[in-house]
Amino acid sequence: MAGVRVFITGTGLITPVGRGAAETRSSIMKGLRGIGPVTLFPVPHGRSLPVGEVRGLPEGSGLPRTHRLALLAAREALAGSKDGPGAIVLGVTTGGMDLGEKYLKADQVRREVFTHHAAGSVAEYLARELGCRGPVITVSTACSSGTAALKIALEILRQGKATNALVGGADSLCRLTYHGFHALQLVDPEGGRPLDLHRRGMTVSEGAGMLFLEAGEHPPETALAEVLGGGLSCDAFHPASPDPEGTGALAAMRAAMEDGGVLPWEIDYISLHGTGTVDNDLSEATALNRLFTQDKPLLSSVKGAFGHSLAASGAIEAVISAMCINDGFVPGNTGCATPDPGLGLNPLMEPVEQAVNTVLSNSFGFGGNNASVVIGSPKRESSPRCHERPSPLRVVGSACITGAGKTPMTWKALSEGRGCHGILPDTEVSADLPPKNVRRVRRLSRLALSLAVSAHGDSGETGGPDAVFFGTGWGPLSETHEFFARLYESGERFASPTDFIGSVHNAPAGLIAIHFRSTGPNITTTGGDYSFEQALMTADLLAGGRDPLILVAGADENHSVLSPLFDDSVWGGGTPSDGGGALCLRRSDTTPGPGLLPVFLEYAGRNPHPVSPLVDRLGGPDGIRERYGAILAGIPLSHRDMGRDQLSRFLNASGFEGPVIDYRRFTGEFASASAVAAVLGVSFVREEKIPEPLCQGKSPRLNGKGVLLMGLGKFVTAVEVMPAKPMNP
Amino acid sequence: MTEHDIDDILSNFVQYFNRCVKGQPEAAPEKPLQRAFKEKLTMNLMDELRIKIIDTLNLEEVVPDDIGEDDQLIGGDLGLDSIDVLELVMMIEKDYSVRIDNKELGARVFRSLRTLTEYIAEESPRVQ
């Protein structure tokens, strides 16, 4: 198989300093600063802090700002292409929060207004508007999301899951981030001054950055730059403060350069994370001083001009990096008057016109999430990357939590035909967790940590997981609710810093990393009912290296107020239920244990026939009947008709006659029910049989076959769990 | 002020008076009374803060007596860090109308339960 290189052939930008590449470049060269008083929402007198707002964003009919920002940038990036993108990977943290928080404040709330609330809804909106029929993944790793998304998209293309992809990040300003960062005292009242001696914090801002990537052996004429490599790591140090030694940041930069086959002295410019907070700049500087013991490349942070647009920032800075390479300039470190001598860095104070071949771009975030990418000139000597088929992922440990209890109780309930709906009390969820470690987090993080600890315990492994992947449809709802309750009760005067930190989607994965000291990639994905499948696919894409131990978990909490408001399936879904599942995996040919492979994940909203490509991917009707003894079908209540139709088409096309378990009827309705189903599938394969009450009178014996886990509805997904003795794929 | 408080102050005064009668050297009578009154309030405030710290920071395994008045509050045995300081800053502004909005002041005030109590007693319109 010929190797591929991944080229940036289109970019889109919308930021507080301009729209589109030309305008942004002109603003950068003039050293403009897009920072001013907040106008998007009222703030109490005397509490106004500077922000970076995108001015003049056209109104959209009931659409949140993030969605509108994302679409504008995406259309610009795709301007040269005829078809919709083959895949979408998007970094998002706030989603529709700017509208959602407004509605939550109002007394009368209609459920319809939350249609675009989920962080994952932005990527789905783009997929629908742009006509994407491939994988759609939303990465929510706080401020590193946009850069992490780029690494994931790079692997999608390298591994041949698509031939082109739209990748980027988008976030809009909202009360949550404005008051949250204020409560953390991380906002500079004079506007962010990255690397300055007197810096006091960042400026929260908004925007979107998008890149259209195309895979090929040689650069196409339209290539602006090449994505050479990406690196991810986790500090596993603190939920919100960076490791002062910069060890995680250093690891991410080193991994990115190694991935791209680039040596430190080949880097011409470093686009810093450089938020302007005292601790971030210090940690990044320490990492850079460790990486470059002699001369450093040119370096600057654009956040003094653009503000910090959270999930968008990494993508925006990747676009700027591509522009630097293509146009030959380097941005100045706007906002910095006196570089802090304690940092030992020498930032570029004014923009310069200068040829640039290779750029390293950094993004670090809450949860100790670090991501770096290396972008190079397409004219640069570079060898195409051959993707070797990796060893399969093998399940070495698993655990679930349902309304019936933890794994053994869930299994017992299903064996007795009782179902496992309901909500396990908090005390039972947290029973095995050290109170000190979970005192600052609420239900979802506790669920996730409990699942991780149980799955790891089940594996019998002594060392903790190297990498953590977590999928959640709605994130930590209890923290989100509590944050707004306190904010609104106090007339928007008080916000809880602890609940703000706990409310980010990647808080649970960060907690798991701290617990196990997991310093490898730490990725949280969110995409409604398919969040866990996105996490599995991301784990499969990213988990390389020498036989790493990987943890993949999915969980959602039922919040009595927010879950029925946000999730249509919960609203009509009978007994409120929640929980999740976790798998400990090794990528190895020799490890015993069921093999697990995410086979298929496609957005089906614009695709009338997602079933035939799925049947083909699974080896056609014969392959399906030979390989699988049972199907666990996930059909969310909100898309019951659509899902049932897809399932019957699949059964007709494949001629599958074994048991098909409509598992949400047993688990109840919640976004991560598929994580429970995955753990059940592993148990079926290990036991070589299925609890009889689930078999609809069909044979409960698997006879050496595997289990197919299907997700249906807005997405069509397939994950196979195969017996320990691998069958030929 | 509750009846108990008045009783306590009176009993402090009686003790002081007895000491004076027994001829022990003491300062002018107003001062000890004021001090006793202030100490009482400080003790009440200190106990109140112990409970509020435990509640605010969800310290399940800690009982009020575990927080010694001169123990290191942050980075000590309680396992508190900068995020907890910010959470306490919010609670203190909300409940006592005392703002602690810069790092240097925070470092001084949150040194121990005693420094925190004294600062609030000094600054809060609700305590004086």
Image (tube, coloured by chain):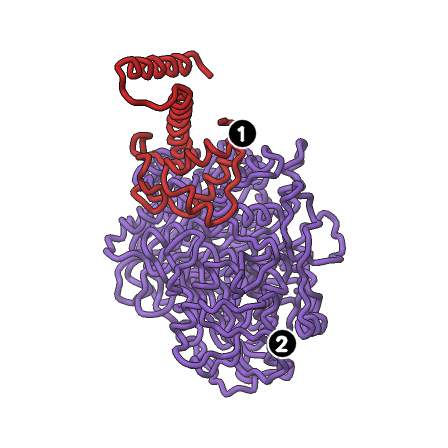
Position of residue A699 measured from the top left corner of the image (x, y, whole percent): 36, 45
| Residue sitting nearer the eye, A88 or A310 | A310
Going by the numbered disc 2, the residue's amino acid type is: Pro
| Residue sitting nearer the eye, B77 or A620 | B77
The residues bearing labels 1 and 2 have C-alpha atoms spaced at a distance of 52 Å
Residue hosting label 2? A351
Residue hosting label 1? B125
Question: Which element carries disc 1, helix, strand or loop?
Answer: loop
Q: Is residue A706 left or right of residue A99?
A: left
Which quadrant would the N terminus of chain A be assigned to in this image? bottom left
Look at discs 1 and 2 and give the one toward the viewer.
1
**Disc ID at residue A236:** none
Which of the 4 image quarters holds residue A592?
bottom left
Q: Residue at x 59, y 33 (%)?
A: A489
- Identify the hue of chain A: purple
Q: Which chain is red?
A: B
Which quadrant would the C terminus of chain A be assigned to in this image? bottom left
